[in-house]
């Protein structure tokens, strides 16, 4: 990565989350992980995801929120259905997005990865705006973190198989890679 001052990207609305910490010393950022999230499940819009990553989720607003209110999680970025990009954690810091995970025999993927959440579910198609924003954002991240190569972009399902399924079968990897090549 270039410098910490370049860790907040101008293409994103900044929403600093407390759910992050320093990466282990000497750790290279060399993995990009794509996720999905919707709050409440399979519902889109509103501020619920942002509130969740900022530890201000109002548990009285939906029964599901009580089940997750104790979690302290974040991702570096969220791409909303309309393509808006939010950034919660600067690139040089460790976001808490991958949990128990392993990539090429390296565990603790949070230590060396950048996490992008797509507002969505495993089964519902992602939007054109999301694919465009995701490709643009991915290229900016690849430029900022040159150790992340296109073959080191994975889904949460790939680093936590059996535990996670996102971004799921609705995510069109071919379409995403095609758009990324055009960047």
Image: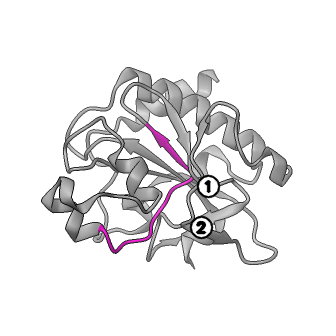
Residue displayed at 55% across by 76% down: 108
Asked whether disc 1 touches disc 2, contact meaning CB atoms under 8 Å apart, the reply is: yes
Look at the image and give the residue range highlighted in magenta.
Answer: 69-79
Tell which of 144 and 75 is nearer to you: 75
Residue displayed at 37% across by 49% down: 49
Q: Main secondary structure of the magenta part?
A: loop
173 is higher (above) or lower (below) than 28: above
- The quarter of the picture where residue 160 lies is bottom left
- The quarter of the picture where residue 125 lies is top left
Q: Is residue 75 magenta?
A: yes
Q: Position of residue 92 (x, y in %)?
A: 73, 59
Q: Position of residue 167 (x, y in %)?
A: 35, 48
Q: Outermost residue toward the left?
A: 63
> Of the residues under marks 1 and 2, which one precedes in the sequence?
2
Q: Is residue 91 left or right of residue 59?
A: right
Q: Position of residue 127 (x, y in %)?
A: 34, 26
Decide: few, some or many residues near mark 1? Use Cα within 10 Å; few <14, some 14-19, many ≥20. Answer: many
Residue displayed at 77% across by 44% down: 144
Q: Position of residue 131 (x, y in %)?
A: 44, 28
Mark sitting on residue 89: 1
- The quarter of the picture where residue 6 lies is top right
Decide: few, some or many residues near mark 2? Use Cα within 10 Å; few <14, some 14-19, many ≥20. Answer: many
Q: Can see residue 167?
A: no
Q: Can see residue 168?
A: yes
Mark sitting on residue 20: 2
Q: CA distance from mark 1 to mark 2?
A: 7 Å
């Amino acid at each position: 990565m270039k410098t910490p001052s370049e860790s907040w990207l101008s293409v994103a609305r900044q929403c600093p989350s407390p759910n992050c910490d320093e990466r282990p010393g000497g750790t290279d950022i060399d993995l990009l992980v794509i996720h999905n999230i919707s709050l409440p499940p399979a519902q889109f819009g509103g501020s619920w995801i942002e509130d969740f990553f900022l530890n201000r989720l109002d548990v009285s607003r939906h029964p599901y929120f009580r089940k997750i209110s104790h979690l302290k999680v974040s991702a570096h970025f969220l791409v909303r259905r309309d393509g808006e990009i939010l950034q919660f954690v600067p690139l040089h810091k460790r976001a808490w997005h991958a949990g128990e995970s392993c990539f090429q025999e390296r565990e603790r993927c949070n230590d060396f990865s950048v996490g992008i959440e797509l507002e969505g579910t495993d089964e519902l198609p992602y939007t054109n705006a999301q694919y465009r924003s995701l490709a643009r954002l991915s290229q900016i991240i690849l430029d900022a973190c040159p150790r992340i190569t296109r073959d080191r972009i994975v889904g949460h399902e790939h680093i936590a198989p059996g535990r996670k399924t996102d971004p799921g079968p609705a995510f069109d990897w071919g379409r995403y890679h095609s758009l990324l090549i055009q960047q």
